[in-house]
Image (cartoon, helix red, strand yellow):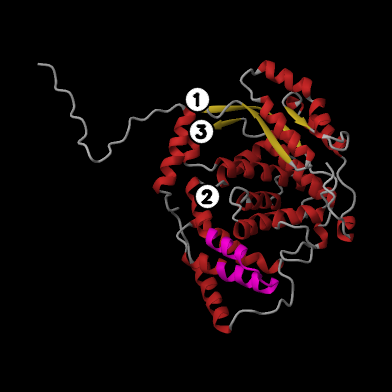
């Protein structure tokens, strides 16, 4: 499918797209063990999705023979849709989540790289906004990152990071650990390790990715993709010189370890969503000038950071206020009163003095329903709870 996205001089300045045939060959050289369970669709070799999916049909059929319980039809349909839109994704080939077992196995992945029309400028726009926007618009992208091959390489490595990690889903762990955020931390950590190996230890692109992921939690309430903590860990390890000599499998294993240490708990995930939801909805409902939008975001992040009881929310707000000046255009028209600016400065100062350790626990009906769904998927049966209108049954009398 031709999306017919108009190109601009900035798109063209990003250079040529990634050579997918070479990138795919490199992956199978690095991970020969995944030849029969990771299938990468090459839109530079196939014009249409049906043709691309048909090209891997024998491998999918062989996987189905090895794992009769694998839901290959669903995976092929999702991959077909993703390919037609040239949208990057990694599609799980797994057994049903409703198998009434403690775990669901993931037997393989179908990976769709970003289409050639996804320039660096367009990919940045997709990350931060709903429209194709110039690099000078908030949040700005520096000219050094307007590199289409580098962006497409990052996106592909991210999707391949999904493909080589998390080969099973522990359902009960989803009551305490964010499954989605852990998967995204694995993928971004792997992609950033490979980025340093490909583009050198002096690259600052991972710092940009860290900040984009953090901004998206504030601007778009994209909590699942909040990988900033994991990416920062990779940045720190790069500064210590620990990444360049890693083999691809070692990079994968390190990414899994980093994600285990840095991903969000379900309580943190809930608290972040709750903290930023009112602001995100309010910003979407009102049309603002760029200057007013930027200052309102800064004002809101400082206030939320000064008031929150969530360590994760506080961490996001601190990083946001520390870094947002790098991405705001210079000389934005001032729209806030002097009193409002003083209040923002006061909140920011208070926020940076705060330290929080314990994440507030999610409660209420939402937690009950979520846990009930997980139990149903896992085949865990609980006796019905007392309805508080009847006395609990008396224990049987001991035999005489």
User: Could you tell whether 280 is left or right of 41 in the image?
Assistant: left
Identify the residue position indicated by label 2 in the image: 269
Q: Main secondary structure of the magenta part?
A: helix
Q: Is residue 207 visible?
A: no
In the rendered image, residue 102, in percent from the top left (x then y), is placed at: 49, 27
Q: Measuring 49% from the left and 30% from the top, which residue is drawn there?
A: 377
Identify the residue position indicated by label 1 in the image: 101
- Span colored in magenta: 276-300
> In the rendered image, which quarter is residue 191 located in?
top right
Above or below for 215 versus 196: below
Whether residues under marks 3 and 2 lie with C-beta atoms below 8 angstroms apart, the answer is no
Identify the residue position indicated by label 3 in the image: 171
User: Could you tell whether 257 is left or right of 150 in the image?
Assistant: left
User: Which of the two labelled residues, at mark 1 and mark 2, occupies the earlier sequence position?
Assistant: 1
In the rendered image, residue 381, in percent from the top left (x then y), is placed at: 39, 28
Q: Measuring 43% from the left and 53% from the top, which residue is drawn there?
A: 360
Image quarter where the N terminus lies is top right
Above or below for 356 versus 252: below
**Crowd tier of the residue under label 1, counting other residues whose Cα lies within 10 Å: few below 14, some 14–19, many 20 or above:** some
Q: CA distance from mark 3 to mark 2?
A: 17 Å
Toward the viewer: 208 or 335?
335
Q: Is residue 84 magenta?
A: no
């Amino acid at each position: 499918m031709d999306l017919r996205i108009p190109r601009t001089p900035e798109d063209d300045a990003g250079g040529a797209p990634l050579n997918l045939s070479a990138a795919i060959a490199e992956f199978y050289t690095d991970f020969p063990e995944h030849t029969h369970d990771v299938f990468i669709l090459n839109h530079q070799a196939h014009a249409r999705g049906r043709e691309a999916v048909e090209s891997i049909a024998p491998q999918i059929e062989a996987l189905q023979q090895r794992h009769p319980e694998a839901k290959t039809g669903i995976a092929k349909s999702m991959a077909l849709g993703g390919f037609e839109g040239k949208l990057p994704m990694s599609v799980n080939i797994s057994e049903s989540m409703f198998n009434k077992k403690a775990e669901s196995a993931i037997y393989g992945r179908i990976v769709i790289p970003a289409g050639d029309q996804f320039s660096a400028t367009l990919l940045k726009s997709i990350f931060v906004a709903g429209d194709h926007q110039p690099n000078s618009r908030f949040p700005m992208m520096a000219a050094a990152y307007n590199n289409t091959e580098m962006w497409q390489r990052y996106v592909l490595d991210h999707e391949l990071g999904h493909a080589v990690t998390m080969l099973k889903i522990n359902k009960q762990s989803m009551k305490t650990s964010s499954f989605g955020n852990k998967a995204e931390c694995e993928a971004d950590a792997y992609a950033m390790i490979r980025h340093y190996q490909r583009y050198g230890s002096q690259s600052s692109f991972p710092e940009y990715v860290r900040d984009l992921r953090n901004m998206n939690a504030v601007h778009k309430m994209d909590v699942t993709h909040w990988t900033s903590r994991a990416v920062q860990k990779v940045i720190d390890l790069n500064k210590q010189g620990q990444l360049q000599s890693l083999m691809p499998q070692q990079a994968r294993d390190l990414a899994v370890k980093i994600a285990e240490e840095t991903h969000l708990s379900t309580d943190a995930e809930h608290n972040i969503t709750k903290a930023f939801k009112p602001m995100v909805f309010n910003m979407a409902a009102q049309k603002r000038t760029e200057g007013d939008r930027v200052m309102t975001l800064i004002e809101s992040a400082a206030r939320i950071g000064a008031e929150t009881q969530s360590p994760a929310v506080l961490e996001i707000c601190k990083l946001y206020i520390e870094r947002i000046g790098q991405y705001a255009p210079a000389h934005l028209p001032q729209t806030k009163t002097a009193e409002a600016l003083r209040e923002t400065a006061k909140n920011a100062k208070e926020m940076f003095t705060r330290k929080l350790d314990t994440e507030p626990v999610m409660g209420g009906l939402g937690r009950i329903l979520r846990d009930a769904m997980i139990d149903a998927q896992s085949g865990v049966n609980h006796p019905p709870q007392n309805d508080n209108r009847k006395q609990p049954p008396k224990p049987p009398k001991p035999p005489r």
